[in-house]
Image (spheres, helix red, strand yellow):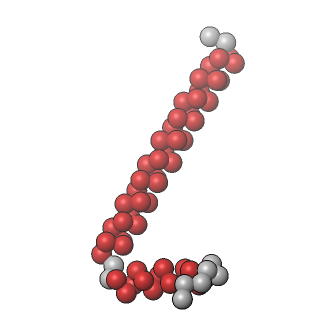
Amino acid sequence: MTNAATTALQGRAASRSGVRVSALFAALLGLVILYGVGFAGPAVIHNAAHDTRHAAAFPCH
């Protein structure tokens, strides 16, 4: 194999590895969010959403 071909194969392997790491991180973050919302009280969830809407200048009343 030439150096260019070897470099191209290494680049693809690194790219796949990066995609896997990103997907794993996204899945873990999603689980943490679901876990946190699942055990938070309704008032806590409402207040967090309410404050977020106001911070984004989105009317909610």
Residue extending farthest to the right is: 4
Q: Residue at x 54, y 84 (%)?
A: 60
Q: Position of residue 45 (x, y in %)?
A: 40, 80
The C terminus sits in image quarter: bottom right
Q: Residue at x 36, y 73 (%)?
A: 37
| Towards the viewer: 50 or 8 | 50
Residue extending farthest to the top is: 1
Please say if 19 is above or below 2: below
Please say if 41 is above or below 1: below
Horizontal placement of 1 versus 21: left or right? right
Please say if 39 is above or below 17: below
Q: Position of residue 4 (x, y in %)?
A: 69, 18
Q: Residue at x 41, y 53 (%)?
A: 27
Q: Position of residue 49 (x, y in %)?
A: 48, 79
| Towards the viewer: 57 or 26 | 57
Horizontal placement of 58 versus 47: left or right? right
Horizontal placement of 20 versus 57: left or right? left
Q: Residue at x 37, y 60 (%)?
A: 31
Q: Position of residue 6 (x, y in %)?
A: 62, 19
Q: Quadrant of residue 36?
A: bottom left
| Towards the viewer: 2 or 19 | 19
The N terminus sits in image quarter: top right
